[in-house]
Image: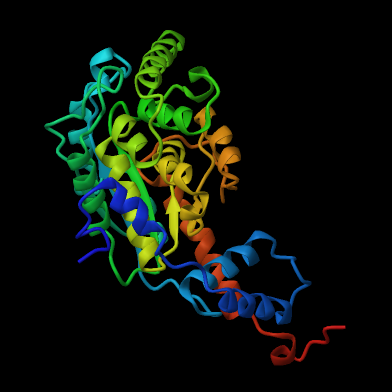
Amino acid sequence: MTILSDVTSLADVAALLATLPTADDQATAGARERQMTLTKPPGSLGRLEDLAEFMAGWQRSDRPVIETAQAVVFAGNHGVCAKGVNPFPQEVTMQMVANFQHGGAAINQLCRAAGADLSVVALDLETPTQDISEAPAMSEAETLDALRRGAAAVTPGAQVLILGEMGIGNSTIAAALAFAAFGGVAEDWVGPGTGSDAEGRSLKARVIDQAITRHKDSTGFDMLAALGGREQAAICGAVIEARARSIPVLLDGYICTAAVAPLFNDNPAWLDHCLVGHASAEPGHAKLLSAMNKDAILTMRMALGEGSGAALALNILRAALECHNGMATFAEAGVSDG
């Protein structure tokens, strides 16, 4: 059973969010106190200290650990591809899912290096969503189904959840969700994706303008249904389930961050348990991170998707906890603290 198993409407999902746990301030404070006793000047490990405190709050322990790290890649196809917004055919989504399953993609190597258990969830790839410029992408029932499937993919005992995606056309979907949530103009949010040239980016912007005009009154989960895709909804479902279980989340780059924009649009606090693994080279991601007041852990000029940047960032998170738990205190080391 997941927290979304019994919900029957998107309104029920929105109401459910208000019941979910928050970080444990006492555990966070305990971790901060420990940081002050370790053999280093206060604050000298910079963000590593912040990450240790973040993990403490969500694990409800001043000595957080990562014994089980889970990575999930959700895959979906999009009806908007009928408008020619992507240079690759949708068959590539299914082909890449097979590559993930056979261990041949970048995410497989990065998860192995970081010690994360990887699974791939293909979401009705033979049935793309509707074209967002012509109709809502998904019905309420389809959106709920994808949310539930995302929640069901979460391993209850994991100490951290890495989320990624695969779906030809989903850079257009990401731009539409970001535009709907934060405004501006379509061109602010459009990037090359899997290799669109200037003409291709212009086409994306025009299609997104049409979609936003059609769905201009959509907010929150209605926005997700109108403009999202199955993998975006599944990512939201996984984020919700992780929150219910106090599991911290590492989001990947632009597409993954934009997927949760409807949650942020409903209430920014729903993403308090989420970190962003890396700042994507997709130009809209920096603007999106600024709008969400999120700082990426890494900047590596990556724009692959698949959860690759989040998997790489897991190494930093592990390092933060190794320092937090393994360093000696001044008293233990017999070092004067001044």
Q: Quadrant of residue 184?
A: top right
Identify the residue shown where x is 62% and y is 80%: 30
Q: Quadrant of residue 82?
A: top left
Identify the residue shown where x is 39% and y is 64%: 19
Q: How many marks?
A: 0
Q: Is residue 5 visible?
A: yes
Q: Nearer the viewer, residue 84 or 139?
A: 139
Colour setting = rainbow
Q: Is residue 102 visible?
A: no
State the image coordinates of residue 66 (x, y, percent, origin top left): 43, 71
Q: Quadrant of the C terminus?
A: bottom right
294 in relation to 224, above or below:
below
State the image coordinates of residue 223 (x, y, percent, origin top left): 36, 34
Identify the residue shown where x is 37% and y is 14%: 210
List the single residue furthest toward the top: 199
Q: Quadrant of residue 42?
A: bottom right
Identify the residue shown where x is 24% and y is 41%: 143
List the single residue furthest toward the left: 126
State the image coordinates of residue 260 (x, y, percent, origin top left): 41, 44
List the single residue furthest toward the right: 338
State the image coordinates of residue 251 (x, y, percent, origin top left): 44, 49
Q: Nearer the viewer, residue 16 or 69?
A: 16
Q: Quadrant of the N terminus?
A: bottom left
Q: Nearer the viewer, residue 167 or 233?
A: 233
